Image (cartoon, grey):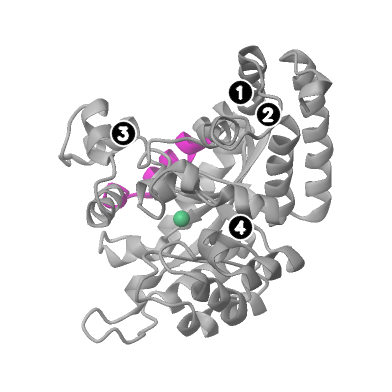
Amino acid sequence: MIMPSDSQKNALCAFAQAMPKVELHLHLEGSIEPETALALARRHGVSLPAETPEALQSWFRFRDFRHFIQVYLTLSDLLRTPEDFAFITTALARSLARQNVRYAEVTFTAYTHLWQNKGLHPDDLIAGLEAGRAQAWDEHHVELAWILDIPRNLSFDPTTGRYTGAASDPTVEMALAWRDRGVVALGLGGHEVGAPPEPFAPAFERARAGGLHSVPHAGEHVGPESVWGALRALGAERIGHGVRAVEDPALVAFLVEQRIPLELNPTSNIRLGVYPDFPSHPLPQLWDAGVVVTVNSDDPPLFNTTLNQEYLLLIEVYGFDAKALEQVSLNALRASFLPSERKQALEAEFRQTFQRLRSQVSLSDASL
Ligand SMILES: [Zn+2]
């Protein structure tokens, strides 16, 4: 293998940052930057554990899962009016535009906002989301769609561990009601341990019968059985994470054969302790096995990352070249739930831009 020269590596990094991209695994509430959180706190007269963006950024920094949930719920609690939801959506679109993300499927946990008893009605949520989505397009030319996810833990009784479905029915109802307002899929989020996919089968069946796609999180903190469950019981068309599928060769073969894409989030996995470090992350094994790999950022400010940063990791840690980076971007576009004509139009645009960028950053054909 020929090691790329420094100038070639710099050219590759410039290429990765400028190339058009699609983001498939990103939580709206987990995308709130410290500055945005402070603005929301001022708006509502709430005090946060830190008062400067820098101090808040360090409070965000992952310590353990409990702290992560505390940060997440604190951010979620700052969202109290339709305008707040529009505000964070526009802020997210600005950040995506800066990274040349053209389209994103953004996960939103509607149920948590109702469960937090903030006096919000479902109509307030969708009104804010839709205002933000329109503004994202008008001002930043970023196209957004929504995935509504069921917070899995809130559907189990904390003392008996029995499935209650508390978060499932309201989430499915909102997702179905908002199909013509940007919602394209039903997701399943939250902590996987003790909350297997199977009990959610009726919820996903209802959503799928209503024309929504199925995109549960699985195989992050639990092994292959969780991914099998998501595929068999929930009809998963893509898997959020799914990284631990690597532990079962039969499952990897199935994912390859059925072309089920995985939404990988390497930095998130390292911060949450799924793997000790980047070199131990199985991204290269999954890629080499022929799995449809996409790379995403999950909760970027909470994990101190961005989508561009994840693409840089592909170069720095996993030795991806320009051709492989283009493949990752196109994998995400093709794995998206955009209508097929829109996908084709965007793919033509992406390919043209890749070509132009290659010459701009002086990537020789030899480095492809
Ligand atoms: Zn996630």
Q: Main secondary structure of the magenta part?
A: helix
- Name the image quarter holding the C terminus: top right
Q: Which residue is mark 4?
A: 262
Q: Which residue is mark 1?
A: 13
Residue type for callout 2 = Met
Range covered by the magenta-colored residues: 76-93
Report which quarter residue 158 is drawn in.
bottom left
**Residue in the picture at 66% in, 67% down:** 237
Q: Is the Cβ of the residue at disc 2 closer than 8 Å to that at disc 4? A: no
The correct choice, above or below, for 333 with respect to 51 in the image is below
Q: Nearer the viewer, residue 7 or 96?
A: 7
Q: Earlier in the sequence, mark 2 or mark 1?
A: 1
The correct choice, above or below, for 95 with respect to 289 in the image is above
**Residue in the picture at 27% in, 82% down:** 157
Left/right of residue 30 with respect to residue 258 in the rendered view = left
Q: Earlier in the sequence, mark 3 or mark 4?
A: 3
Left/right of residue 45 with respect to residue 131 in the rendered view = left
Residue type for callout 3 = Pro
- Mark 3 → mark 2, Cα distance in angstroms: 26 Å
Label 2 C-beta lies within 8 Å of the nearest ligand 1 atom: no
- Name the image quarter holding the N terminus: top right
Q: Which residue is mark 2?
A: 19
- Mark 4 → mark 1, Cα distance in angstroms: 23 Å
- Mark 2 → mark 4, Cα distance in angstroms: 21 Å
